[in-house]
Amino acid sequence: MATKEHDNDVRLILTGIKLVSFEVDDYCISSGQPYSGVSVTSDDTIQIKAGRHGTSGVAEWFKNNSSGGVVIACDSDDKYPSKLNFAVFGTLTFQLTGKTYVVKKMLLAQGHNARDRNNWWTGGPEMQGGSVDPFIGAAIATTHDKSGNIPLGKIAFTADIFDCNKFNLMIIAL
């Protein structure tokens, strides 16, 4: 098993978005693999510095932490992953049109799909499912103000079936 640390990038695409931070509350990584944390590296990119070795233990941790909520995956039609390289659980903060929004209890994870590509998963225990035409399979999160206490609206995360490194974001109500 290789123990090399990689710069694992996932993009959150929405015109005008500026990612501020992803604060990790907890994480899980396959045994023996390195992990150095999470950072925002551009307006739309989150980077997780970690090794890549998929295990069922990380997938089970992800499933348990999403309990009661919805998850979606890029470049996959599986309901849940069977193996993941790593997973993080925390709070996403972003700015849009000069206002700060917070998504609490969010999961991000990387696995490996049937097409031999590393693919990303997101969701959370408080995310709801939905279909947003023309997309199917949205994970919808409530956004809060920068204090994290006052609900501001909803944002949908949708996955591109052919792109394994990004989620498209759609404003449902702000």
Image (cartoon, rainbow, N blue to C red):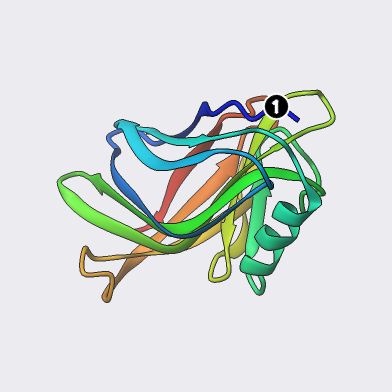
Residue 170 image-quadrant placement: top left
Residue 174 visible, this orientation = no
- The residue that label 1 is drawn on is 2
Residue depicted at 81% across the width and 46% down the height: 78
Q: Amino acid at mark 1?
A: Ala
Question: Relative to 77, is 114 above or below?
Answer: above
Q: Is residue 132 left or right of residue 117?
A: left
Q: Position of 7 compared to 130: left or right?
A: left
Viewer-side residue, 172 vs 28 = 28
Residue located at (76% from left, 30% from top): 1
Which residue in the rendered view is the most extreme toward the left? 98
Considering depth in this image, is 36 or 92 the residue closer to the camera? 36
User: Could you tell me if residue 39 is visible in this image?
Assistant: yes
Q: x and y percent of residue 89 in the render?
A: 50, 58
From the top left corner, tell me how far across and down residue 92 is, in percent. Answer: 37, 53
Per the image, label 1 sits on a secondary structure element best described as: loop
Residue beneath the point at 62% across and 67% down: 65
Task: Please rate how many residues cluster around mark 1, counting C-alpha atoms within 10 Å: few if below 14, some from 14 to 19, many from 20.
Answer: few
Using the image as rendered, state which of residue 104 and residue 3 is in the foreground: 3
Horizontal side of residue 97 vs 155, given as left or right: left
* Quarter occupied by the C terminus: bottom left
Q: Looking at the rendering, which quadrant does residue 124 occupy?
A: bottom right
Relative image position of residue 164 (x, y in whole percent):
64, 29
Task: Look at 75% across and 60% down and name the residue there.
Answer: 60
Residue 135 on image: x %, y %: 63, 42
Image height of 42 relative to 151, above or below = above
